[in-house]
């Protein structure tokens, strides 16, 4: 029966795909943003004064006059109805890592019972929903149900479509009755305001007039695709998002033939439809390609304003899942769905602009280069002081399996600058020539030109967690399924603190000594925090030893990694910048811990069920078959084959005993400490994977890696 299911799955896939391309949906530039309440749409429905006020709120964070909300709501309703929407929802991002929505019809009744389509300013600005069933980490009791959504005008409303209609989605924050943040958006918005204030303050010392500060993000999203027929036969994938069992096939990714390879027609049809859906939502999907592991892929949009980019990434993940289902595929966002091959990350490319000036891009004059080097040193200081917080916001059960393996960076946070930029930093630190490539004399802030630094002045270091890549920093530690919010919230906050540290120092520098004073400040920062810079192989054992000598934290597991959220100095930092209160920080730690423990126990429970109810019976049948054949051969007094049958029976028997012992151990460990659960699950996996090589393929109950990773 097992092989019948698997064989039929392969047959179905083969018939569906064949040699002909899968039908696709054409992508047109006219699709872009058609389901978004854009500025262009606003101009069709709103007066100039209302648009000007709304754009000041969107671009500069100015408060919006509540009296204008009614005009905006009326315009949104007219536009949404014209686009086929029948309902609206406040779309928010609770602390479970996903998105949430409660749909309300535009329908209202007048005194005579006549149907009206209504949507007021009150409906737009805020809403009330049940907060009791969302994670709160102690901020709310079960019986305290009230939660409130508040319109975020900096992220445009959009329409989500389904087979029978459409819904107007209004991005919102989500807070409790007492005003505490119950979502991921609110702290992100607070951190954006914090870094805007700190950046504006610092730029004044460089004589720049006040300008718009914009934090930008480009999020590279990796994911796996497998056929739905296989997925539905894998209870571990359905319950946990990853395979708890599976012997590595002889060929997986070691031939390096999948990366950037030709995209299969079925996958290309899926990708094309994904892009069409994203373009309609105004999401600038730019790049698509095969990733390193078989059945692994990547999509990347163009850089956008941070808050919008985070919202868009949440929509990207949803669209990937929905469109995959239409193509009889399943999109896996787990950080490590398959053992022994690459996991999936979400590389967050973070940058900062002040007006039309990119603060992380070397300029064409000494003044701009002084700004660039100041920003660079601020980031170095921030990451060195708070690498534990950056690790905390990337923690999770899935990421524990990914970090440090197969091209994912290790749990030790360090910065990669590349040889050329490192040499520049060393010149600032020492005040002398440090290398053969250096220009004559020492580099003087505000007076000298930097050596020519093209956008990508150095080779890439795929093992580095936090790499400078031309005009941005690429943080490679976040996992595929994680929200970008917490990661970028933390980067904003720690960089804001470093900007303020430099500003505090500059306040004591006379105006006519600015360049000399700034150079001294940057020298001190480099001398104190250069330990975080590492351009070598982050996977090497030598780096682990060296990092320990430098005093860099190596937080390998989630429980270790989230503990810095409770350190008083760390809490003081986030409280100081108004990003998270103490109660909100404590709640985040509790939520992360509870989520981690629950995931471990779910994985342990389904692993035990599969082992007992699927693997063990198949292995016993195989053992009985071999033993029966052996007895028949012995009864016939055959002289050949007896030794082979005895050997097979012995191997099967030993593996069955190991499976049984491992299952018994897991049954006890499942209520124990995380380390005990992990150890027991790993022992059970070894036993099951050993049996996969011994049991007749016709009897093996689970789709194998060689099928899931290569047949799609």
Image: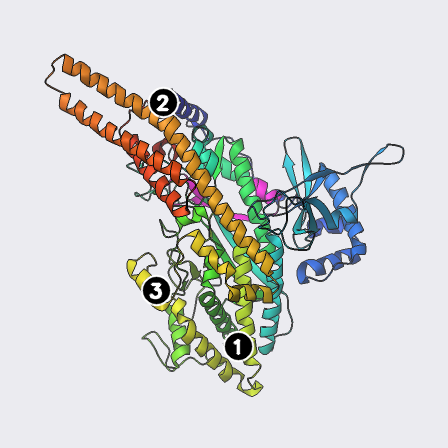
Give the residue pinned by disc 1. 367
Tell me if I can see residue 55 in this picture.
Answer: yes
Indicate the quadrant where residue 685 lies: top left
Residue located at (54% from left, 49% from top) = 591
Residue 448's place in the image compared with 578, above or below, is below
Which residue occupies 51% across, 50% down?
592
Q: Position of residue 525 (x, y in %)?
A: 45, 75
Q: Kindly indicate whether the residue at mark 3 contacts the one at mark 1 (C-beta within 8 angstroms).
A: no
Tell me if 77 is positioned left or right of 439 in this view: right
Residue 241 seen in the current view: no
Q: Nearer the viewer, residue 259 or 521?
A: 521
In the picture of the structure, the residue carrying the numbered disc 2 is 3
State whether residue 73 is above or below residue 362: above
**Label 1 neighbour load within 10 Å: few <14, some 14-19, many 20+:** some
Left or right: 163, with 87 as reference point? left
Q: Which residues are magenta?
A: 276-297
State which tag comes first along the sequence, 3 or 2. Answer: 2
Compared with 286, 696 (above or below) is above
Circle 3 sits in a helix, a strand or a loop, which is it?
helix
393 w.r.t. 209: above or below: above
Magenta span includes 473: no
Mark 2 secondary-structure assignment:
helix
Residue at 37 percent across and 38 percent down: it is 666
Specify whether residue 277 is painted magenta: yes
């Amino acid at each position: 029966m097992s092989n019948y299911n698997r064989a039929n799955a392969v047959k179905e896939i083969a018939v569906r795909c064949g040699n002909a391309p899968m039908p696709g949906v054409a992508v047109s530039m006219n699709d872009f943003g058609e389901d978004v309440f854009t500025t262009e749409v606003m101009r069709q429905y709103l007066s100039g004064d209302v648009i000007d006020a709304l754009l000041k709120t969107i671009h500069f964070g100015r408060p919006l006059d509540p009296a204008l909300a009614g005009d905006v709501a009326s315009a949104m309703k007219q536009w949404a109805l014209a686009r086929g929407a029948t309902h609206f929802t406040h779309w928010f991002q609770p602390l479970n890592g996903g998105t949430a929505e409660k749909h309300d019809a535009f329908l209202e009744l007048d005194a005579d019972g006549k149907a009206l389509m209504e949507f007021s300013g009150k409906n737009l600005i805020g809403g009330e929903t049940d907060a009791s069933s969302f994670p709160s980490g102690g901020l709310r009791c079960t019986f305290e149900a009230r939660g409130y959504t508040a319109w975020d005008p900096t992220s445009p409303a959009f329409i989500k479509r389904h087979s029978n209609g459409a819904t107007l989605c209004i991005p919102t924050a989500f807070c409790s009755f007492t005003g505490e943040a119950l979502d991921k958006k609110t702290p992100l918005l607070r951190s954006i305001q914090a870094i805007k204030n700190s950046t504006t303050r610092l730029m004044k010392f460089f004589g720049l007039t006040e300008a718009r500060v914009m934090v930008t993000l480009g999020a590279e999203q990796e994911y796996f695709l497998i056929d739905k027929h296989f997925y539905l036969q894998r209870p571990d994938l359905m319950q946990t998002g990853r395979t708890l069992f599976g012997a590595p096939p002889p060929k997986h990714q070691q031939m390096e033939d999948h990366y950037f390879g030709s995209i299969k027609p079925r996958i290309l049809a899926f990708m094309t439809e994904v892009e069409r859906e994203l373009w309609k939502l105004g999401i600038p999907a730019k790049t698509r390609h095969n990733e390193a592991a078989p059945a692994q892929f990547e999509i990347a949009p163009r850089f956008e304003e941070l808050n919008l980019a985070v919202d868009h990434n949440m929509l990207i993940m949803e669209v990937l899942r929905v469109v995959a289902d239409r193509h009889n595929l399943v999109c896996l966002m787990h950080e490590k769905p398959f053992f022994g091959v690459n996991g999936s990350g979400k590389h967050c490319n973070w940058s900062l602009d002040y007006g039309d000036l990119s603060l992380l891009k070397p300029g064409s004059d000494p003044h701009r280069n002084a700004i660039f080097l100041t920003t660079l040193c601020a980031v170095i200081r921030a990451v060195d002081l708070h690498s534990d917080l950056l690790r905390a916001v990337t923690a999770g059960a899935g990421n524990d399996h990914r970090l440090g393996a197969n091209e994912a960076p290790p749990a030790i946070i360090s910065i990669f600058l590349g040889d050329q930029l490192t040499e520049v930093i060393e010149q600032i630190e020492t005040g002398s020539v440090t290398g053969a490539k250096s220009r004559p004399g020492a580099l003087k802030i505000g007076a000298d030109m930097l050596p020519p630094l093209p956008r990508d002045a150095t080779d890439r270091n795929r093992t580095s967690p936090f790499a400078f890549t031309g005009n941005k920093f690429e943080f490679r530690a976040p996992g595929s399924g994680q929200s970008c919010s917490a990661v970028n919230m933390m980067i904003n906050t720690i960089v804001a603190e470093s900007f303020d540290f430099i500003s505090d120092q500059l306040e004591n520098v006379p105006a006519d000594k600015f360049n000399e004073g700034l150079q001294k400040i940057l020298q001190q920062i480099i001398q104190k925090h250069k330990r975080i810079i590492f351009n070598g192989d982050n996977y090497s054992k030598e780096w682990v030893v060296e990092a320990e000598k430098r005093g860099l934290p190596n937080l390998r597991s989630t429980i270790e990694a989230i503990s810095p959220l409770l350190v008083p100095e760390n809490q003081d930092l986030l409280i100081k910048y108004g990003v998270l209160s103490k109660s909100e920080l404590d709640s985040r730690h509790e939520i992360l811990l509870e989520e981690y423990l629950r995931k471990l126990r779910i994985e342990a429970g389904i692993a035990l069920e599969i082992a007992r109810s699927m693997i063990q019976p198949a292995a016993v049948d195989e053992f009985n078959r071999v033993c029966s054949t052996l007895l028949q051969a012995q009864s016939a007094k055959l002289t050949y084959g007896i030794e082979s049958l005895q050997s097979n029976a012995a191997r099967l028997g030993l593996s069955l005993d190991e499976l049984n012992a491992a299952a018994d151990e897991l049954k006890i460990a499942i209520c124990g400490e995380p380390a005990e659960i992990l150890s027991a699950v790993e022992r059970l996996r070894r036993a099951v994977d050993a049996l996969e090589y011994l049991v007749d393929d016709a009897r093996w109950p689970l789709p194998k890696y060689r099928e899931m990773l290569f047949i799609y």
